[in-house]
Amino acid sequence: MEYHGGNIYEHNKTIIDFSSNINPLGVPQCFKHALLEGIADFTVYPDREYKKLRQNIARYIGNVSIEDIIPGNGAVDIIYRALEAIEYKNLYISRPTFSEYKRAGEKAKMVVKEINIYEQEYEGLSLECLIENIEEQSVVLLCNPNNPTGTLIEKTEFLELLKSLQKTKSFLIIDEAFIEFAPKFKDASMVEYISQYDNLLIIRAATKFFGLPGIRLGYGVTRNIDLIKSIERNMEPWSVNTAAEIAASCIFDDQEYINATLDWIGSERRYLYEKLSKLNGLKVYTSSSNFLFLELLDEKMDAYELQKKLLEYNILIRLPKGFNGVSRYNFRIAIKDRINNDILINSLKEII
């Protein structure tokens, strides 16, 4: 099953992995120290209520209580559990977007409806076609910034959608797994509105921004107590391991790492976009995340052929088959550090 990036294991050589959009600053130093100091904690079970874990997350987000937090084994885990818990008939998702949304909806026996809401250049969206077609007691699941396009949805548009969903007794789930990479991300997040809308669930991942995909720590934020209890009933005990608990004890307070990440993403996103935009035969879409969405304009070569050629340069890109609503000429690349970004740019120059 090849739905995701990061599959470096089938290549018997060192790979520069542009398919997996993880913070290139790597594991925070604070976690390395905390892990060594807390190694003895592996001899006992985690707290099934995860009180300290939820306290750390609530402090990081701000203006929420620990009762609003649902920890899980990654953001995808929360998505699957939430759709099972809501028990509505229809799930509306955008085209294009992350393929796991459709799989999660189908697993929950929902009718999945894919709607084209993004403009041609993916720089904005039109909600009318979505709002007009939503049936009663449905779930709308949107990624912000969207994966793979990097499109950031404005708060005003979400608020308009939420008011419409209230009328149809429907629910909005926003996957903010990449929100920390967005410009002024605290202003871009919808988490402040959970107190005003009980039909809103925000999902976050602690692993992408903090460079810890192997830890598997995600969490949901909502003020809907009934939904929280229903999700908790669907989850296995100890769904979050001790290593993730230790990570949460320090990474959210590591302001040096957070600031360095924000400085890096701002400069490297601009740099990589500008350099790649100058290449003939390649369309680069603007992004508010730590990845770029691209399209090959010469139909003599698709993304699958490009991946084969780039592997000769020890570079792995994200193929289109992990996303719905994209063509075989689309692909996604992570934004990495300057050295690796330049390697990719020069390799694409030679190939394209």
Image: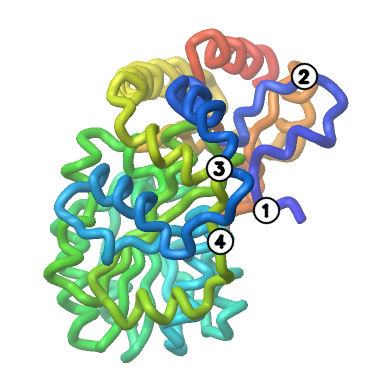
Q: Which residue is mark 4?
A: 239
Three-letter code for the amino acid on which mark 4 is drawn? Ser
303 vs 258, left or right, is right
Judged from the image, the secondary structure of the residue bearing numbered disc 3 is: helix
Marks 3/4: CA–CA distance: 16 Å
In this orientation, which residue lies closer to the viewer: 170 or 226? 226
Judged from the image, the secondary structure of the residue bearing numbered disc 1 is: loop
Three-letter code for the amino acid on which mark 3 is drawn? Asp
Three-letter code for the amino acid on which mark 1 is drawn? Tyr
Q: Which residue is mark 3?
A: 41
Residue at left offset 53%, top offset 31%: 35
Three-letter code for the amino acid on which mark 2 is drawn? Thr
Q: Are marks 1 and 2 in contact (CB under 8 Å)?
A: no
61 vs 270, left or right, is left
Is any atom of residue 97 visible in this view?
no
Which of the 4 image quadrants contains residue 6? Answer: top right
Q: Which residue is mark 1?
A: 3
Is any atom of residue 71 visible in this view?
yes
Marks 1/2: CA–CA distance: 22 Å
Q: Are marks 3 and 1 in contact (CB under 8 Å)?
A: no
Marks 3/1: CA–CA distance: 34 Å
Q: Earlier in the sequence, mark 3 or mark 4?
A: 3
In this orientation, which residue lies closer to the viewer: 242 or 142? 242
**Total labels drawn:** 4
Judged from the image, the secondary structure of the residue bearing numbered disc 4 is: loop
Residue at left offset 40%, top offset 18%: 268
Marks 2/3: CA–CA distance: 34 Å
Q: Are marks 3 and 4 in contact (CB under 8 Å)?
A: no
